[in-house]
Image (tube, rainbow, N blue to C red):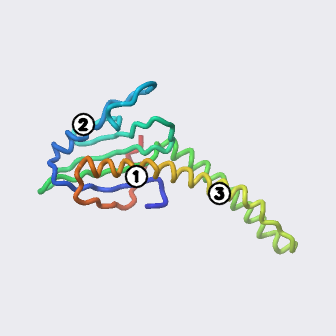
Amino acid sequence: MKFLPYERFRIRTSLSSQEAVNRLENAIEPKRFFRFFGASEKPYEGKLEGSHFEISRIIGYRNSFLPRIKGDVESEISGCSISISMQPHVFVITFMIFWLGGVGFAFLAALGSFVSSLGQTSTADPSFLLIPGGMFIFGYLMVLGGFKFESVKSKKFFQRLFEEEEVEEMGFANPFEAAG
């Protein structure tokens, strides 16, 4: 869905599955906990086990909404397909659910108070709806913007890496089924 920080797509290519795995291997380095000086020679870090990979882009700045990328390379009759899903880290998703849930609840409570005051006085002031409403919109846009900023870069990278012939957007699936 375009309104959630989650993407799923499949790239179909004429490359063999082994060639696709080799290209991935050349683009991924093992995850390091500390990255102080010097840029990495490879654009992604994580692990590649057989035809399954779990990676994230190496960036020189902080972005808590950096997509965690999981994928599988599958052989097909004329080449292979690479199924990819991207989502923020599960801790970020959990925190944002609580944050957006809290300010959303505050907005609904303020809205209820405003609606009930409409019947009692003709000078009901809706300005107190701006704070929780603004916090909700800001939080939502921060999550979506930070995620999309990076997911667009990764999607273009994979299209170039696999010399894509077809990109199929896939529907929403449960992003927590293999979260980690």
Cα distance, mark 1 to mark 3?
A: 28 Å
**Helix, strand or loop status at disc 2:** helix
Q: Residue furthest left?
A: 77
Name the residue carrying label 1: 152
The mark closer to the camera, 1 or 2, is 1
Q: What residue do we see at 51% from left, 47% from top?
A: 93
The mark closer to the camera, 1 or 3, is 1
**Helix, strand or loop status at disc 3:** helix
Q: What residue do we see at 81% from left, 72% from top?
A: 118
Q: What residue do we see at 21% from left, 41% from top?
A: 21
Q: Which mark is residue 104?
A: 3
The mark closer to the camera, 2 or 3, is 2
Q: What residue do we see at 32% from left, 56% from top?
A: 9
Q: Which mark is residue 20?
A: none
| Rendered position, 148 above or below 129 | above
**Picture quadrant of residue 110:** bottom right
- Judged left or right of residue 104, residue 76 is left
**Picture quadrant of residue 108:** bottom right
Q: Amino acid at mark 1?
A: Val
Where is residue 37? Give x, y as percent. 44, 25
Find out whether the residues at labels 1 and 3 contact each other: C-beta distance under 8 Å: no
Q: Which mark is residue 25?
A: 2
Q: Amino acid at mark 3?
A: Gly
Cα distance, mark 2 to mark 3?
A: 43 Å
Q: Amino acid at mark 2?
A: Glu
Query: Pointer 1: residues within 10 angstroms few (<14), some, or many (20+)?
Result: few
**Helix, strand or loop status at disc 1:** helix
Sequence-first disc among 1 and 2: 2
Where is residue 73? Give x, y as percent. 23, 47
Query: Pointer 2: residues within 10 angstroms few (<14), some, or many (20+)?
Result: some
- Judged left or right of residue 17, residue 36 is right
